[in-house]
Image (cartoon, rainbow, N blue to C red):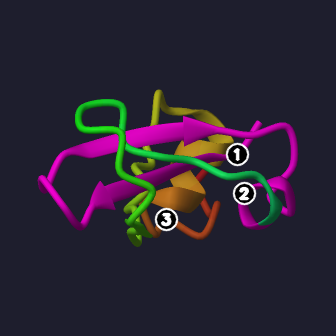
């Protein structure tokens, strides 16, 4: 389920909107929940990657998966 972040151009309120598919974000109308304005702009959101260890964690940390035996 894609999550998009928006900022209202009227009041500056930032909010998230959830959609079933990414394509729906372009088709469905969305407005500010604070002032009701439809003048909103989609923001570029950052993603966070975390690691709990293990093989995937080693690859994310730059280990390349090699270990001395």
Return the residue at label 3: 63
Where residue 46 appears, as percent x and y from the top left, is: 37, 62
Front disc: 2 or 1 = 2
Q: Are marks 2 and 1 in contact (CB under 8 Å)?
A: yes
> Magenta region: which residues?
1-26
Look at the image and say whether residue 2 sits in the magenta stretch: yes
Residue receiving disc 2: 25
Query: Which SS class for mark 2?
Result: helix
Q: Residue at x 49, y 32 (%)?
A: 53
Of the residues tagged 2 and 3, which is closer to the observer? 2
Residue visible at 47% across and 27% down in the picture:
52
Q: Position of residue 24 (x, y in %)?
A: 84, 54
Q: Quadrant of the N terminus?
A: top right
Q: Residues within 10 Å of mark 3 (few under 14, many from 20)?
A: few
Which mark, by number, is residue 2?
1
Quick one: label 2 or label 1, which is nearer the N terminus? 1
Disc 3 secondary structure class: loop
The answer to whether the residue labelled 1 contacts the one labelled 3, judged by CB atoms less than 8 Å apart, is no
- The image quarter containing residue 22 is bottom right
Foreground: 55 or 28? 28
Where residue 12 sits: x, y (%)?
13, 56
């Amino acid at each position: 389920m894609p999550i998009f972040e928006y900022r209202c151009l009227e009041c500056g309120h930032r909010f998230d909107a959830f959609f079933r598919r990414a394509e729906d974000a372009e088709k469905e109308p969305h407005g500010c929940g604070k002032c009701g304005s439809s003048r909103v702009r989609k923001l570029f959101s950052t993603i966070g990657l975390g690691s709990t260890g293990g093989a995937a964690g080693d690859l994310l940390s730059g280990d390349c998966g090699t270990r001395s035996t």
